[in-house]
Image: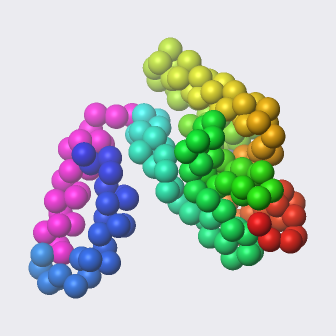
Amino acid sequence: MGVDFDLEVHDIMPVLSVVAVKELRVVAFDCQDLTSTEMVDTLTPEERGARMALVRNKNTKPEMRVRSMAHRMGFRFRLHGARLPGRPDLVFASTRKVIFVHGCFWHRHPGCSRTRMPKSRLDFWEPKLLGNATRDRKKQDALEKLGWTVLVIWECETENEEVLRRKLLEFLGGGGG
Ligand SMILES: [Zn+2]
């Protein structure tokens, strides 16, 4: 299961820090072997990117950046609203607003350079990726019919803190969640 590499190492690092340095090295080498044999050799870069995007579906770095910023701005919210269409990443129940944090490649950010269609196996990728975008739109429509206001924040928009802060402020308003 080399695909879980990033998340798992990140998650267990605090625990590992108390383990002897020698054992830490052994664990690190094991992880490297896992990724090189299971992923690097068999997948094209595009496939690898898509695979990682899928694996990082929840608790991704861009999502963490949005959660962290919204929290620092004083907004309170629930995570992954399980009963709502599409399980939105952040749910602001009192104001009936939801935020999706989408990876640019996987969810097809319009006009974004990260959204380039893979060159190989287009017959496989195109319907898959366009299907994702179509499903996203349907879920957003369903939410809006239920009276929710929906915002999509794209991965590339989470990388500049000021851009992200302004986007959240504009959507959520000034008075806290
Ligand atoms: Zn983008």
Q: List x then y, in percent, for residue 35.
A: 26, 50
Describe residue 70's horizontal placement relative to residue 26 as left or right.
Answer: right
Please provide the residue range marked out in magenta.
24-45
Indicate the quadrant containing the C terminus: top left, top right, bottom left or bottom right.
bottom right
Query: Is 41 one of the magenta-colored residues?
Result: yes
Give the residue drawn at x 23%, y 57%. Answer: 32
Q: Quick check: 99 above or below 10?
A: above
Give the residue drawn at x 87%, y 70%. Answer: 174
Magenta segment main secondary structure:
helix
Q: List x then y, in percent, for residue 154.
A: 68, 49
Q: Quick check: 129 above or below 68?
A: above
- Return the residue nearer the eye: 176 or 11: 176
Describe residue 10's horizontal placement relative to residue 61 as left or right.
Answer: left
Q: List x then y, in percent, for residue 106.
A: 56, 37
Query: Is 56 one of the magenta-colored residues?
Result: no
Give the residue drawn at x 46%, y 41%. Answer: 54
Residue sitting farthest toward the top: 123
Describe residue 119's horizontal placement relative to residue 138 as left or right.
Answer: left
Describe residue 95's horizontal placement relative to residue 103 as left or right.
Answer: right
Q: Is residue 49 visible?
A: no
Give the residue drawn at x 13%, y 69%. Answer: 26
Indicate the quadrant containing the N terminus: top left, top right, bottom left or bottom right.
top left
Q: Quick check: 64 above or below 103?
A: below
Q: Is residue 135 visible?
A: yes
- Return the residue nearer the eye: 16 or 149: 149
Q: Quick check: 66 above or below 129?
A: below
